[in-house]
Image: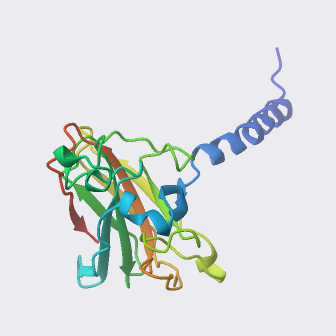
């Protein structure tokens, strides 16, 4: 039986084109918006800690941090004295706003995670890693304000993790765009999130950042 090379190539091309949109969708960067977490007017219900001022991770990279209760369950705000200082239910959203002057790719590692399960999906509300985009409904949480040109979109950030789920690595490509400064305490820079679920809810396990 003679193999028709042209027919085989055509079939493979059709298959590749059919699968391409699926692969693109699966690898889409998970995005949450500030108001997905809560509005400015009820910040006491979801803003647990921060935002902090920027601190140096390396000589070229700085970071600000904030800890949120994404289910709007700040314990002290809803009368849960047993878990005061934490989030009722133990779900925590850690925000990291990164600025860097490096023009080469960097990796920032979030270590000492407790209660983390790696879920990198295109749906920002179900993914446990991703980025935060600013909107007008929430001017308290750290987030990224998109601008124009290269700053009109997020870079191709990717996430990997350790086998024991105690470390998440944030892979940032070369030269971050010059994102505009946000409103209120939204800050300025690339803002990523990592979500955990601790049991018990307190004491809160603070992660450690390295790399950059």
Tell me the quadrant of the picture where the N terminus can be found: top right
Where residue 153 appears, x then y in whole percent? 61, 70
Residue extending furthest toward the top: 1
Q: Is residue 209 above or below residue 150?
A: above
Q: Is residue 33 above or below residue 24?
A: below
- Seen from the viewer's position, the closer of residues 117 and 167 is 117
Position of residue 158 in the picture relative to residue 165 (left or right): right
How many numbered discs, if any?
A: 0
Front one among 135 and 81? 81
User: Which sits in the foreground, 52 or 6?
Assistant: 52
In the picture, measured across the screen, residue 4 lies left or right of residue 87, that is right
Q: Position of residue 198 (x, y in %)?
A: 24, 41
**Colour option used:** rainbow
Please, which residue is most extreme toward the front here? 79
Q: Position of residue 48 (x, y in %)?
A: 30, 61
What's the residue at 77%, 42% (across, down)?
17
Quadrant where the C terminus lies?
bottom left
Instruction: Name the side, left or right, on which 191 lies relative to 125.
Output: left
Q: What residue sits 64% from the left and 46% below the top?
A: 25
Q: Which residue is rendered at x = 53% and y = 53% of the image? A: 30
* 130 relative to 40, above or below: above
């Amino acid at each position: 039986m003679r193999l028709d090379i042209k027919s085989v190539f055509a079939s493979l091309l059709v298959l590749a084109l059919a699968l391409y949109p699926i692969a693109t969708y699966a690898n889409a960067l998970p995005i949450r918006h500030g108001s997905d977490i809560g509005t400015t007017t009820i910040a006491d219900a979801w803003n647990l800690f921060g935002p902090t001022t920027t601190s140096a991770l390396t000589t070229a990279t700085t970071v600000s941090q904030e800890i949120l209760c994404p289910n709007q369950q700040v314990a002290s705000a809803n009368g849960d004295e047993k878990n005061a200082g934490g989030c009722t239910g133990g779900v925590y959203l850690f925000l990291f706003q990164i600025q860097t002057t490096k023009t080469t790719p960097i990796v920032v590692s979030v270590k000492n995670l407790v209660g983390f399960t790696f879920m990198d999906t295109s749906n920002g509300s179900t993914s446990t890693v991703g980025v935060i985009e600013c909107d007008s409904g929430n001017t308290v949480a750290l987030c990224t304000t998109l601008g124009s040109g290269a700053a009109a979109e997020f870079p191709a950030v990717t996430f990997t993790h350790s086998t024991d789920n105690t470390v998440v690595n944030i892979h940032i490509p070369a030269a971050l765009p010059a994102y505009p400064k946000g409103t209120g305490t939204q800050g300025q820079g690339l803002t990523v999130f990592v979500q955990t679920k601790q049991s018990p809810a307190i004491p809160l396990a603070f992660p450690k950042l390295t790399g950059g």
